Amino acid sequence: MRDMLDIQKLLVPDLLDSMKKRYTVLQHILVSGVVGRRTLAASIGSTERVLRGEVEFLKEQGLLQIDASGMRITEDGRLLLEQIEPLVKDLFGLTDWEERIRSRFGLKQVVIVPGDSEASPHTKKELGRAGASVMRKLVKEEEVIAVTGGSTMAEVANQLNATASMKSCWFVPARGGLGESVDLQANTIAATMAKKAGGRYRLLHVPDHLNDEAYQSLLQDDHITEVFHFIRKARMVVHGMGDAMVMARRRKVDPETTASLQREGALAEAFGYYFDRSGRILHKMPTVGLRIEDIHDMDTVIGIAGGRGKGEAILAVLRYGHEDVLVTDEAAAAEIVQLLSS
Amino acid sequence: MRDMLDIQKLLVPDLLDSMKKRYTVLQHILVSGVVGRRTLAASIGSTERVLRGEVEFLKEQGLLQIDASGMRITEDGRLLLEQIEPLVKDLFGLTDWEERIRSRFGLKQVVIVPGDSEASPHTKKELGRAGASVMRKLVKEEEVIAVTGGSTMAEVANQLNATASMKSCWFVPARGGLGESVDLQANTIAATMAKKAGGRYRLLHVPDHLNDEAYQSLLQDDHITEVFHFIRKARMVVHGMGDAMVMARRRKVDPETTASLQREGALAEAFGYYFDRSGRILHKMPTVGLRIEDIHDMDTVIGIAGGRGKGEAILAVLRYGHEDVLVTDEAAAAEIVQLLSS
DNA sequence: TATCACCGGGACGAAATGAGTCCCAATGTG
DNA sequence: CACATTGGGACTCATTTCGTCCCGGTGATA
């Protein structure tokens, strides 16, 4: 049954929404006994007119009856509600979580895809697809989009495709080299995205570890400063999130810093910054590009990460408090929800 | 699963329509390979604009991809189609018929594809695909597969593709020349199948009408006897079925025999044998190859035929009682079911 | 290499549908 | 009897859907 629901989610997502809505209406009427249209609308959080449409439909189906005193559920309706409950729970699960996380951190949107992207490549793809879809929906014309590296971001890039507004956009890496392998670093992702989206891009080629002297000379470079300007103009940033220690190891952060991070309880990493449990910044990777202040007044900050074990890290970044959209998967969302409620 | 569908039918009646529609679109694209929007719209019987909406949705879901040369299905789409097939069959009410026919004749499997393969080329293709799919599933390594001619079998050959076990198989015509035109005769089909499946083949070149003398000299021919050995080793036979009189005419059977067949009530033809209503053999075409006794202890006998008007013929062959698998279409199945229940 | 048919996508107006907002007669309740 | 609340009717406006073109590009073919 679960498979079938997944199929339907893919094939007729809007119909499932409508099903959920009608279920909610019926459910409310069941618990209310007899209730009026306006009262019910207020209680469900729908407008009167919309609810009316649903109610008329449900009446048509014989699931509820209407008289001058109000609406009440019929025997058929009660039976149906009983049968459909497990189904809707499944259906609700994720949207429920989405809403809880969204409201808890005041986000614009939360998207949770079913599955565990760490365990299943398909879910990882799905995560990428969801990320790409969110980008497509939120992007504006002539915008500069800053992106980070990582395998999840690579998948997002893979799943991106051309739309009218995307074509007029510029893709840039959010920050310079962070020690990732070539095909996962921000430069590559930005280039791939631009290619897939039909847009243009600027890359930021800076060495991984640079001293002050080198930094100063970099700032003199015309090409580099030009890219800086682009990055500063970004109104949208799309970034992955990772476990602090895992990222530190992968990026070959020096042992001293690693130890310090560990000591201070570093949990998460995002766009080159390390965060602790409460979302405080502990450390900044020594490279150039987007500054953390730039994140603050960004129009759209989209965080994308998933997989069992990522929940804590995502939560830490969310607590930093400057995300707008979160795209994650069921496994990570489960952890987040659990941590939130404990 | 069926209950769930019933619930959904009550709560969101359009869901099923919408699902069926999108399934149909995807299905058509699958069998067409690459196809344009307008062509597809005409073939499905939808308007261009509506189809476009569906296609854009399906693209959004990653189930098909679009480029300048047309639309094609993605791996995800192919997978989804496979998963959803039983469900859609349920919607069409075909699983029910499948089971009724299967149990009535003690078959291993019955597959019914939606539509009328006589009226719609698409359904004919679909019939071929279903036939090929059954073959793929039932074939064993290093097996010899005997096939017959006919337009349906040609379509099966077209839709066949290589699998590991298929590659080790031999394809042979079940019987020698039966008077079919070149591209529909068993030899051609066997060769095509072998090519598509990546397997090998042996052909049986014998003249259509031969006398005893010629027959004896044939049996002396080393090449011919070698092919005979192959045919006798076949454990799987895949054959079409036809209306007796139609086949007799197409194969230019002499008027005397034709009259005799008509007199005795010949209804069906399969692998060169003519059957009456009750499945009794009336006549055997004068050629060489698989004998009817060989059919009896065959591992897998797969009969494939469809189209309005074929129901009676198929039923006659089924009554002969040595089929294992039947692949047909909705139109023929409807006739079979109706005849069975009357 | 030139041609041509068919491809996807953009555009636009007509039509339909959805949704917000009132109002009103009826009904139940005190 | 008065009052609150009910469902249903009506109207307008916004949005979406749909039919129907056209266009530039592309792949096959001659």
Image (cartoon, coloured by chain):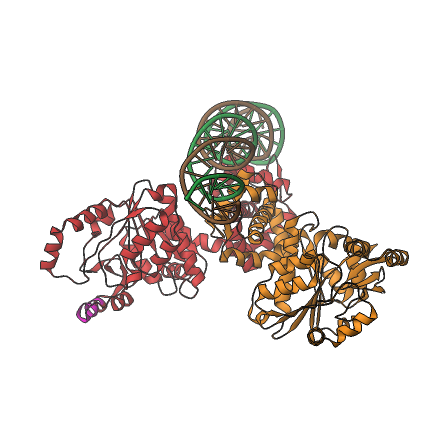
Chain colours: A red, B orange, C green, D brown
Which residue is pictured at 61% across the width and 58% down the height?
B158
Residue A255 located within the stretch drawn in magenta: yes
How far from the left and from the top, in percent, is residue B325?
A: 71, 65
Q: Identify whether D15 is placed above or below B85.
A: above
Horizontal side, residue B228 vs residue A249: left or right? right
How far from the left and from the top, in percent, is residue A83?
A: 60, 55
Name the chief secondary structure element in magenta.
Answer: helix
Q: Nearer the viewer, residue C21 or B136?
A: B136
Residue A51 located within the stretch drawn in magenta: no
How far from the left and from the top, in percent, is residue A203?
A: 24, 53
Q: Nearer the viewer, residue A1 or B232?
A: B232
How far from the left and from the top, in percent, is residue A184?
A: 31, 61
Q: Nearer the viewer, residue B195 or A168?
A: B195
Which residues make up the magenta segment? A253-261
Horizontal side, residue B93 vs residue B48: left or right? right
Which residue is pictured at 56% across the width and 40% down the height?
A54
Quarter of the image for residue B231 reads: bottom right
Q: Is residue A277 visible?
A: no
Give the position of the N terminus of chain B as an image quadrant.
bottom right
Which residue is pictured at 34% across the width and 61% down the height?
A151
